């Protein structure tokens, strides 16, 4: 929510696209089952005007009961996400619906520049912690960091910086904003493609 309000909305307004974020589950987000998304789609799309669109930002991590979400041997995560998004379009057909699934979760964006974490924890020396995180992920691009219960991006962060868990709802957006959309796009091609589609909604 904060990422949309603080980072995406000001940027998209430059393209005459005005973003209005809304949780699909409760007031703090969380895991979104597909039936909840279907209900939200039915609720919103039928009331959209011709210039309005509905998009999603749901994490691939812990995705539940989504069409096409099965794992296939040898399939790259970005291929799995593309299949899920295609299945979402088929199940929820509307030219005004733009499905997006985040690889593998929002915290992947934080891994674009781990140094941007430090201002959120001013009393801590994170140099060694950040070095360990960089060693762990090696040459993996942020969107390629896996989604197991211990090694998903947020799980890695919480394991070495326990205080991140309590700040997760707000710190991630601040860190991503500090990194900036230019660098996020450069390091996260799937995210970049979605952002480009949003920028184009007002016809350039």
Image (cartoon, rainbow, N blue to C red):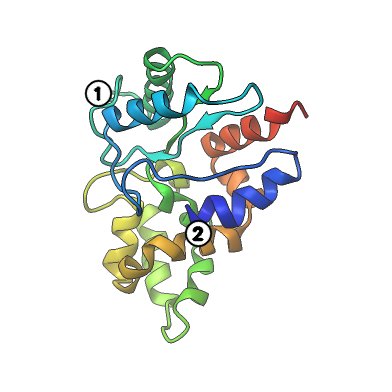
Front disc: 2 or 1? 2
Task: For the C terminus, give its image quadrant.
Answer: top right
**Residue at position x 39%, y 75% from top?**
128
Is 190 above or below relative to 180? above
Residue 113 % position (x, y): 53, 60
Q: Toward which corner of the image does residue 16 lie, by quadrant?
A: top right
Mark sitting on residue 173: 2
Q: Percent x, y for residue 33?
A: 26, 34
Kindly indicate the quadrant of the structure image that contains residue 189: top right
For image coordinates 68% across by 52% down, the residue present is 10
User: What is the secondary structure assignment of the residue under circle 1?
Assistant: loop
The picture quadrant where one finds residue 160 is: bottom left
Q: How far is disc 2 from disc 1 in space, using C-alphas?
A: 29 Å
Q: Which mark is residue 70?
A: 1
Label 2 or label 1, whichever comes before in sequence order: 1
Query: What label does residue 202 carry, if any?
Result: none
Q: As drawn, is 161 to the left or to the right of 93?
A: left
Q: Residues within 10 Å of mark 1 (few under 14, many from 20)?
A: few
- Measured as percent of width and height from the top left, residue 97 is found at 51, 23
Look at the picture and state if 198 lies above or below 91: below
Where disc 2 sits, the SS reads: helix
Left or right: residue 178 versus residue 202 is left
């Amino acid at each position: 929510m904060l990422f949309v309000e603080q980072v995406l909305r000001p940027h998209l307004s430059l393209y005459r696209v005005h973003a209005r974020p809304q949780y699909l589950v409760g007031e703090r987000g969380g895991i979104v089952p597909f039936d909840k998304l279907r209900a939200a789609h039915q609720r919103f799309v039928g009331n959209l005007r011709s210039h309005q669109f509905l998009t999603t930002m749901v994490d691939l991590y812990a995705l539940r009961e989504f069409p096409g979400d099965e794992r296939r041997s040898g399939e790259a995560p970005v291929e799995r996400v593309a299949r899920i998004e295609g299945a979402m379009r088929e199940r929820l057909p509307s030219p005004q619906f733009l499905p997006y699934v985040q690889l593998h979760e929002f915290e992947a964006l934080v891994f674009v520049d781990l140094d941007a974490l430090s201002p959120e924890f001013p009393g801590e020396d994170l140099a060694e912690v950040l070095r360990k995180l960089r060693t762990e992920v090696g040459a993996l691009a942020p969107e390629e960091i896996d989604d197991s219960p211990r090694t998903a991006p947020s799980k890695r962060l919480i394991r070495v910086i326990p205080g991140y868990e309590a700040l997760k709802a707000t710190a991630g957006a601040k860190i991503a904003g500090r990194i900036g959309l230019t660098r996020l796009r450069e390091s996260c091609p799937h995210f970049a493609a979605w952002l480009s589609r949003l920028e184009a909604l007002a016809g350039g």
